[in-house]
Amino acid sequence: MKNYIYLDNNATTQLDKKVLKTMLIDLKGPPYNPSSIHAFGRKALSLLIESKKKIASLLKIYPDEIVFTSGGTEAVNLLINGIYKKGHIITTDIEHQCVYNTLLNFQKKGTPVSFLKTGLLGKVTPKQIKEAIREDTSLIILSAVNSETGIKIDMEEISEIAYEKNISFIIDAVQLLGKSFFTIKKSMTGLAFSGHKIHGPKGIGFAYIKKNSNITPLIIGGKQENNLRAGTENLSGILGLTKAIELSYTNLTKNIKKIKRLRDHFENFLVKKLNISIIGEDRICNVSNMIFKDVEAEDMLILLDQKKILASHGSACAAGSISRVLLNMGIKREIARSAIRFSFSRFNTFKEIKKAEKEIIRIYKKLLLFKK
């Protein structure tokens, strides 16, 4: 990270040193397997149980409502494939690939799926959800925060609509954790989370599954995770994830304010100096998706990379392509080609932001001159 200005925190985040230290309990310790009945196994199981208790306490849920997974994508797939039995599904056409592509496959196999349009608002409204519900609607699946624009949905209001109609509601909450206060309501059937978006390790996440939900496991084998996710648990990842969540909740208000100040300074300065615009209004604190008019985002990203300033064109899962999210919002292709997503974290500093601002102005003006 030295000498780099990292502004791609929605793709992944810097591992917190305190998280790494916690992971070493497993990585440098004895050969731990929570399924073993000997002393090492009992210690491993104790660490696993304690992790669930800590996470549950922070999120105000029950420990047995947590199922550890390999990350957000698996958590989403467990929830969708495990909860859905039959009937009509409601989602949008701007969801993350793990939702969008999963439901496209469902649709190809004959499942009725409504991919709602959000328009330039960038989020589906409760009114749209109400109007899309049919007699056979059994599942609604939405992202709490869009990973490319940072736009937030009305999560609680939509969950109440689903609850009143006895419809399961699944939330991709990967980009919500550590960036906003939220409450898991009884009207929410399942939520998916990931470790590496909150300064935790890659390869670990978890699904919240409401008590007494009728869910079928995605991965079959042993009896781990209450028979809902077979395979030896990634204990080092679980310890790291737990610590990352603890740290994200420590001074959360202070961190949200800091990140938002950085983001707002960045946006206000560049909008004042350049002919650019920002996508979305009701956004999470750390995301700024900017339209750099009349230049190719790829060209800007290459030149920024050469100056050790790292950002992205959109979702890391769709690198190298024009954003499906922006296109489906109704943004014209030539404009979407000029979009760059900057995403911030608590490790960013004002010194970095000011340096990045100057380089962005210089590079943008250079590209405009070159185009002429």
Image (cartoon, rainbow, N blue to C red):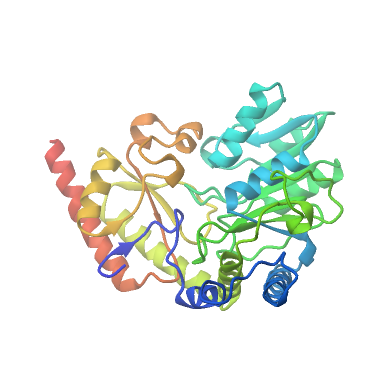
Which x, y percent locates residue 230?
A: 70, 52
Q: What residue is drawn where x is 72% and y is 45%? A: 220
Q: In which quarter of the image is residue 13?
A: bottom left
Name the quadrant of the C terminus. Answer: top left
Q: What residue is drawn where x is 64% and y is 46%? A: 76
Give the vertical position of 149 relative to 184 (above or below). Answer: above
**Quick check: 49 left or right of 152?**
right
Give the vertical position of 72 relative to 86 (above or below). Answer: below
Name the quadrant of the N terminus. Answer: bottom left
Q: In which quarter of the image is residue 114?
A: top right
Which x, y percent locates residue 320?
A: 35, 38
Which x, y percent locates residue 246?
A: 60, 74
- In this rendered view, identify the residue nearer to me: 328 or 241: 241
**Quick check: 192 left or right of 333?**
right
Q: What residue is drawn where x is 31% and y is 61%? A: 269
Residue projecting furthest to the front: 38
